[in-house]
Image (spheres, grey):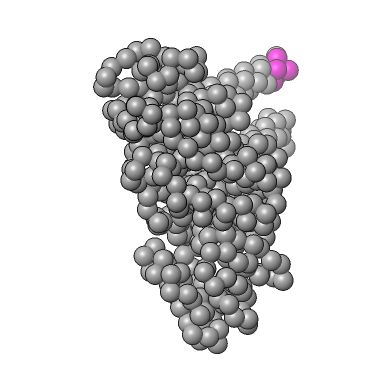
Amino acid sequence: MSFGWIFALVIGAFILFLAIFISIKFIKTEGASQDAFIAKDISVLLNPLETGFEEGKTTTLQLGTETRIYNLCENDTSFGKQKIRTSQQSFGKWTESYAEISSRNKYIFSGNLIEGKNFYLFSKPFDFPFKVADLIFILPADKTYCFVNIPEDVATEIKDLRLKNIVNATSSGNCPSGSQSVCFNRAGCDIVVNRNSEGTSGSVTKNRENMDFNGNALMYGAIFSDVETYECQIKRLMARTSELASIYEQKADFVASKGCNTNLNLIELKLAAEQGNFAFVSSIVENIREKTAYLGCRLW
Amino acid sequence: MVKNLGQMKIQQTAFMLIALTLFFALVGLFIAGFKFSDLKRGASDLEENNAMLLVTKLANSPEFSCGEAFGSKRDNCVDADKVMILKDEISSKYRGFWGVADIKIRKIYPADNSACTAISYPECGVINLISNSTIGTYDSTFVALCRKEAQNNDYYDKCELARLMVSYQNKQ
């Protein structure tokens, strides 16, 4: 074989290797940028879920391909961070994406990894005792939840939210196969919800771990998310409650000079929320709620 | 002569290869540049979308909304007293909270261009909540700007027409 042939073969092989290498790199980069775009898109699409005086809002998220949404919650900074990362299936493999989209004013309750083509998104305002935030819940459309012994107010809410993947049953035995059963004030399900008689607070037991809640919004949060995400979001919500309590405390002083007196102990709420003891904060909130009902001049 | 011809061929091939590499490098750079500008445009579009959707909902967020403080439940109503307190806290605790470059509330009627401070409030027209020197494009929405006013040892609710403005940074 002549030198020319050997030379051409070596160089040809090198060029071919380089072309394949660059193509693979290019496809990976494209996949990662696509994942980042989808994550940012989801984050932007969550804005319309902010509620005014509505009790809740629902929307659907339709992604053409099988997608994994990673719900990452961080509470290291003052209000913590809600991060989203996505990964899509390409040629039977999940794309590797490290681009996280973070926002500080959103609170997403879901498992830390959810997977599917279509998702149901709904939001509910969290009042504690003033509106603190809108909580967002993401459920994969192909995952069914079966609510057993559902209280009337929750049944009405679910019906109004038009969540097609939540079904009602009289007992866990009647639940569709493969569904996740949720029992209200009754044992024998994957998830057990114990609500007090007024339905204002209680706890959710999941995988032998308890999550305390106050109000229906947090109850859904405990049902649909995992324990780590729930606890992280609670800490973030407490931080915002504390800051809002401080703003309302200063507003109370300001409007008192104009004759609008409230006499609410918001400093206590601010300090308790800062410490993050949820049960203690809940008791203070209930106390403030009672007092607010009889106030002539309202702060919120 | 034969040796020289062989050297000539190797030189030709080497020059050809250099030219080919340069050509593909330039094409690659062109594609990368195009993709990068596309990425930037996409990011900018998303920022614009974010600002547009945020501005319609910002008035209802807890730090801004009137809630039931002014008699009845009001949508697109901003509590001016609360926002003036927020103005002092926003640079420290709320930095980057809404993910936009600039937020301001401008009173439309009665029109007034003076900036609101703790001293001038409520006799002022513009509440600058987040101010950024590198401002991008504005999106805005009309809101009711309400506050408590004192009158004859009593108080009353006063609402004025205002514009809530949010700006985002252009990535391009």
Residue B75 image position (x, y, % from top left): 33, 42
Q: Is residue B4 magenta?
A: yes
* Range covered by the magenta-colored residues: B3-7
A224, B25: nearer the viewer: A224
Looking at the image, residue B127 sits to the left or right of residue A29; the answer is left
> Which residue: 72% across, 71% down?
A208
Q: State whether residue B121 appears in this view.
A: yes
Q: State whether residue B58 appears in this view.
A: no
Residue B92 image position (x, y, % from top left): 61, 26
> Can you say whether B104 is above or below A285 in the image?
above
Q: Is residue B104 magenta?
A: no
Q: Quadrant of the N terminus of chain A?
A: top right
A218, A253: nearer the viewer: A253
Q: Residue furthest left?
A: B109
Q: Residue furthest top?
A: B114
Residue B146 image position (x, y, % from top left): 35, 32
Q: Quadrant of the C terminus of chain A?
A: top left
> Which residue: 29% across, 28% down?
B160
